[in-house]
Image (spheres, rainbow, N blue to C red):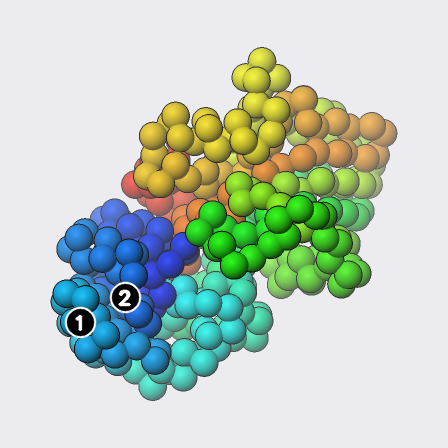
Amino acid sequence: MSVRVAINGYGTIGKRVADAVAAQPDMTLVGVAKTRPNFEAERAVAKGYKLYAAGSGTVDSFAQVGLPVAGRIEDLLKEVDLVVDAAPEKVGRENARLYQAAGIRSIFQGGEKPDVAEVSFNALANYAAAKGKHRVRVVSCNTTGLSRAISVVSSRWPVEHWEATIVRRAADPAETNRGPINGIMPTFQLPSHHGPDVNTIFPQLSIATTAVVVPTTLMHVHVNHVRFTAPPPNSAALLEAFRSTPRFHVFPAWAGVDGTPQVMEYARDRGRGREDMMENVLWENGLRVEGKDAYFFQAIHQESIVVPESIDAIRAMFDLAPDAAHSIAITDRTLGIPPP
């Protein structure tokens, strides 16, 4: 079976998910939709993707700049089994009515509230929960990173409480209208929304999160403090758990990776599409266990980390793989994510 997929929203996330869908052996990318012409729309056409007008966009607005359009989003939805909504935050909820009227399944991004879907999703944590579902929400980049780490740790050792401070990038590289340019901005929602979002995946976990925004476009960094009930792991065992799990990359101390600039330089040197880093990034010398407490840093590439999760969500919804491990292996191989 090949699932016919549409992408509604062809920006930072949508264009990456489109390329990922096109690379899958059990999925077919039918088309992508945008509200207005820009360089991303031109690139979609150059790749041979059928382009459709969405939202307030018109076919004429694309035609005027020489971009061929196959129709409107409503036409595209008639040709597919599922749509991945990658529209801006809160627009997905408005689009949900379109998908319901078309009678097709839909995947939403983490910028939407959880109740837009039947289940919030992370491949390592709750793959089976999406099987057979019609509306699934792939959680945000930060929640994806936290959920992956929690899945690794809590499946091996009993966790009493998890605390994380999210050091957030201010904007994606192309977002020139956002800031701050020179400042560190506390997020005054205390605790931050990330903990409750994690609880949509791990409802029984005791977790508290806080967040600050810093003037960078590269990545997010999480400062994690985990308290275990006895007996806790030692540092070596915890590091090995991360190293042996798909979608984690642990830099050794000798690698000279001091922070996110070197992480992204490593991604560039690796030569994967768009220089993305879809794995959770940890540092060997950035993890320590003391008594019942573990402390570790992880970096999250906000532009790409949810892309493999979106692919696994499609596979789960249509029951195309027997379990998470099989789906993750297919997804990672096609996207060039090295196995553990």
Task: Residue under label 2, please give it.
Answer: 37
| Mark 2–mark 1 distance (CA, rounded to whole Å) | 9 Å
User: 337 or 152: which is nearer to us?
Assistant: 337
Q: Is residue 233 left or right of residue 216?
A: right
Task: Residue under label 1, please give it.
Answer: 64
Give the amino acid at mark 2: Pro
Q: Which residue, as the protein is rendered here, is positioned at the far bottom?
A: 101
Q: Is residue 306 left or right of residue 194?
A: left
Is residue 174 visible to us here? yes
Give the amino acid at mark 1: Gln
Quarter of the figure with the N terminus: bottom left
Q: Residue at 54% x, 65% y: name it.
A: 111
Q: Residue at 72% x, 53% y: name it.
A: 185
Q: Which residue, as the protein is rendered here, is positioned at the far right?
A: 291
Is disc 2 surrounded by few (<14), some (14 to 19) or many (20+) residues within 10 Å?
some
On the image, the x and y values in percent for residue 135 come to 44, 72
On the image, the x and y values in percent for residue 198 come to 64, 57
